[in-house]
Image (tube, grey):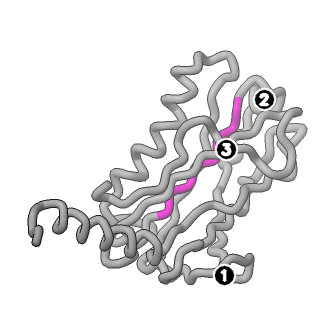
Amino acid sequence: MFYGDTVLGGSASAHMAVVAANRAWISPVSATLAGIPNAPPTEDITVPVPFRNTGHEPATDASIVGGADSIAIDATYDEIHAKEQSFEDYCFSISGAKHMASAVSVVVFPGGSATNDFNALITIRSELMDWDVIYGKKYLYLHACVVYQTFSEVRHTSVCYYAQSGKTVGSLPFCDKGNRAVSLSG
């Protein structure tokens, strides 16, 4: 008989595998922007960003925060990646939905169709859409963070999309950095 660390470690690994296979997994479906306007808008623009729970358990206490930002296209890759990474870092610093001041907590049920998606809206403030964004001299970033609980553990999903006038229409591509999903504990 063998009762060493291998058996106990194997049991813990098996438990973690069962939890991972059955827990809620929230991920973005897409972000769609009809196009960047031809002139700076006078009103804010909202972009729908649906999120889907592809897991097997409902995600509870789910809250989504989002925002938009921009950066010059001639910025260095390090500057661009730092901008993309900064919102992800902010997202993972949130300890839970109850700590988000403007958050509205919801339950996101599992399902692989649009009928179960949680539809978030990211607002692009009108003052962010300056002439440099309009002329394609700046990238426009859309960031979203989902904080939720599953199996009594806080989880996070961070997503970053970008657009450039004249090059990006419709479904937005993901940023190089700023996209991650993991639990608070790792």
Q: Does residue 57 appear left or right of residue 166 in this picture?
A: left
x, y (%) of residue 125? 66, 48
x, y (%) of residue 156? 43, 60
Q: Does residue 33 appear left or right of residue 46 in this picture?
A: right
- Of callouts 3 and 2, the N-terminal one: 2
Amino acid type at mark 3: Phe
Q: Nearer the viewer, residue 48 or 181?
A: 181
- Of callouts 2 and 1, the N-terminal one: 1
Q: Which residue is mark 2?
A: 131
Q: Which is more foreground, mark 2 or mark 1?
A: 1
The chief SS type of the magenta part is strand
Q: CA distance from mark 3 to mark 2?
A: 23 Å
Q: Which residue is mark 1?
A: 116
Residue 7 located within the stretch drawn in magenta: no
Q: Does residue 160 appear left or right of residue 126 in this picture?
A: left
Name the element at disc 1: helix
x, y (%) of residue 124? 67, 50
The segment highlighted magenta reads: 139-146
